[in-house]
Amino acid sequence: MTEKIRNRDQETEEQLDRLYELLDQQQFELLPPFDEGKIRLVYLMNDAVESFLVFEEAVLTGTYQENYEGELEAELRLEKDGRYVLIIAQGETVCTLFFRRLSLEVQLYNYGKTGHVWMKGHEELRQIEYWIAIMKAKREYLGEAYCNAAELQLTALEEFPPLNCYSYPAVPRKYFEPREDAGIPSKEGILTMQRIAEEADDQRLIQVLERYKRKNGPQRTKNLAELFCRNAHSKVVQLLTEKILQAAAEYPDRVFAPEEECRYAAIVKEAESRRAQLRSEGKEVLLFSQMPFVTARDEVEYKVHLLVMSRGLLHRKVEVETFLQEQ
């Protein structure tokens, strides 16, 4: 990229920094249509948020490859008439985007009703790791103004290795690059978990966390991570899950086209009936859906997952039941 351009328009200047960030990460995914004066660039997309940088009074020329996955070259210029020119080279093809202003479009969603089962084993802890990770991404990319008070506290657990991607990654490691410091706890991360353990009145875990605060390392992290799977500490896991779900519930649910909503409702109804049956048997059950994005439609298939938890001899057992659309 060339030297950063500054502008007297505070909104545009702030979003230009986000644009430079994406380009530095080799990310540039435009959302069609491209001919309506406003062109959207995907910024942050996950179960918690769908956000876009919006090029206003925009015109796209040249050849833009929607499925391009190679290296990008980019140059941004500001012309004398105040119009921006963004030149993007995708391999041998070039497209040019002319625009006057750049704004941010954000839609926040209730992520407590959404989830995925990408890896087997300790699925309830991996789901917690996933929720905390997307919460933290929202905070880092969009800022604290897009988080509620509970989320600002819970995101500290991203720096608590016994529960973060260091111990319970929600996604296979080949699909993400773990942070170099993922195994290093922060003071705030440990204190946040201590407060939850105290609220759950888990005296044994409180003692272990106090020792972990004074001295930690890979083996101590492994030992502490194993405790969260035990029946004896299930109340802490339940309380943490409840806190996440309550924080997420402050945002609206995703809403789809009527015909889609009708199909999805049938799957949810079947899953809820099964959950009621399992709960009548005294089992703890989490229900969440895997669903596509609303604005930038993807190929994710709608599914409903039940995480069915029961007590083993020492550890909780987790079974997954999945409900799909009829073909």
Image (tube, rainbow, N blue to C red):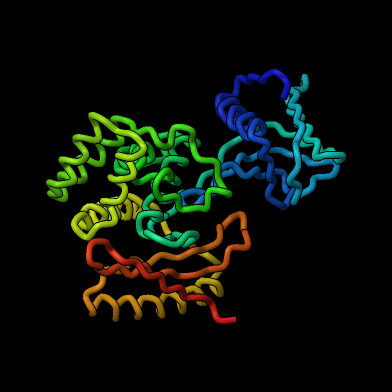
Position of 229 compared to 44: left or right?
Answer: left
**Quarter holding residue 296:** bottom right
- Residue 237 position (above or below residue 224): below
Q: Which of 191 and 40 lies nearest the eye of the viewer?
A: 191
**31 or 290: nearer the eye?**
290
Residue at image position (76%, 42%) is: 70
| 171 relative to 262, above or below | above
User: Which quarter of the picture shows residue 326?
Assistant: bottom right
Image coordinates of residue 117 in percent, x first then y, are 46, 62
Which quadrant: the N terminus? top right
Q: Residue at x 60, y 19 (%)?
A: 8
For the image, the number of numbered tags is: 0
Q: Nearer the viewer, residue 58 or 122?
A: 122
Does residue 67 appear left or right of residue 262 in this picture? right
Percent position (x, y) of residue 210? 19, 35
As displayed, is residue 240 above or below residue 82?
Answer: below
Residue at 29 percent across and 45 percent down: it is 223
Q: Position of residue 14 (x, y in %)?
A: 56, 27
Farthest front residue in view: 219
Q: Residue at x 21, y 45 (%)?
A: 196
Task: Name the spot of residue 4 as percent of width and height, x first.
Answer: 66, 20
- What quarter of the picture does the C terminus occupy? bottom right
Question: Left or right: where does residue 60 sit relative to residue 170?
Answer: right
